[in-house]
Image (cartoon, helix red, strand yellow):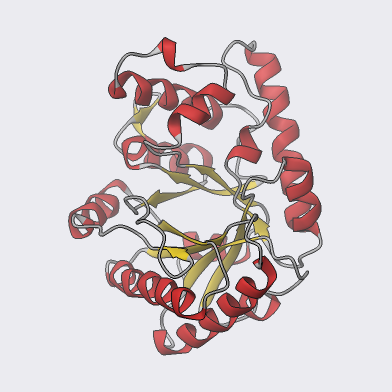
Amino acid sequence: MSTQTSRMASGQGFVAALDQSGGSTPKALKLYGIDESKYGSEAEMFELIHQMRERIITSPSFTSEKILAAILFEKTMDSQVEGKDTAAYLWENKQILPILKVDKGLQDASEGVRMMKPIPDLDDLLARAVDKGIFGTKMRSVIQNADPGGIHAIVEQQFDVANKILARGLAPIIEPEVDINAPDKEAAEDLLHEELLAHLDPLGDDKQVMLKLTIPTKDDLFVDLIAHPRILRVVALSGGYSRQEANERLARNHGLIASFSRALTEGLSADQSEEEFDQILANSIDEIYQASIT
């Protein structure tokens, strides 16, 4: 097992999700105190979000002591932090594993789910990721109802793409998010749990994937997945819960660690002094870390 794989498998900490893409970037910037009047083009928007991410990554509180990995958007992978490629900076300067978001967004809802859009440039993207020193990937789809056919289809699609990623030597994070507002959330999670188990054994003895899942309604629903030999790690998304509620729910699920995005950056603002910014981020990191190791 490589040093990086061993760290992901057994290291203490959580995964920072810094992968807001085109659709979610304006909202992330607004929460950070930068509204749409501050930029006039997509390029300017992405430059501003990269500045926010760089500020987070270079903060003295953003260290491998409590953070295992960081999930990056493609443009972040292609950008630099302090003159070094972002992935290289994370691993070489911080010993934090770099992970790349590879999906291209969601299709319209059908059978109670939103499947991933096709990823036509996946092979080229994975080749660039390997060249950049990326450790793993992440791809998201969404479950809105407890529809057995839809949930089967969404898991099937995730594992089909995951096998292509594994073939490139990268560690895929499979993320079939269950909407926290789903009217039958618990039933959907039970169906998802069974589908995931059914798809793990066919991977083969030498393959492992990671899972990124909504914090379940039923505490410890995923303990058998966490212990499964085909699973490298199971992480949880905050899914729209406040950081406090997400942490409380997470702490009740043994072995499940955080991979929070909005909950991680909650309270950060562009106009804060470096000292104030670092203190708020440090408090956020510590709270999420404590919930992840409980």
Residue in the foreground of this view, choosing between 227 and 182:
182
Image location (x, y in percent) of residue 170: 36, 63
Q: Quick check: 165 above or below 156?
A: above
Q: Residue at x 36, y 36 (%)?
A: 22
Q: Quick check: 44 above or below 176?
A: above
Q: Viewed as shown, does residue 125 lie left or right of 154?
A: left
On-image quarter of the C terminus: bottom right
> Image quarter for residue 141?
bottom left
Q: Viewed as shown, does residue 123 lie left or right of 74?
A: left
Q: Quick check: 246 above or below 203?
A: above
> Image quarter for residue 228?
bottom right
Q: Residue at x 76, y 67 (%)?
A: 254
Q: Viewed as shown, does residue 45 lie left or right of 268?
A: left
Q: Quick check: 39 above or below 30?
A: above
Image location (x, y in percent) of residue 45: 37, 22
Residue in the foreground of this view, choosing between 53 and 178:
178
Count how many numbered circles sit on residues in the image. Answer: 0
Q: Residue at x 47, y 89 (%)?
A: 201
Q: Residue at x 63, y 14 (%)?
A: 274
Image location (x, y in percent) of residue 119: 25, 57
Image location (x, y in percent) of residue 222: 67, 74
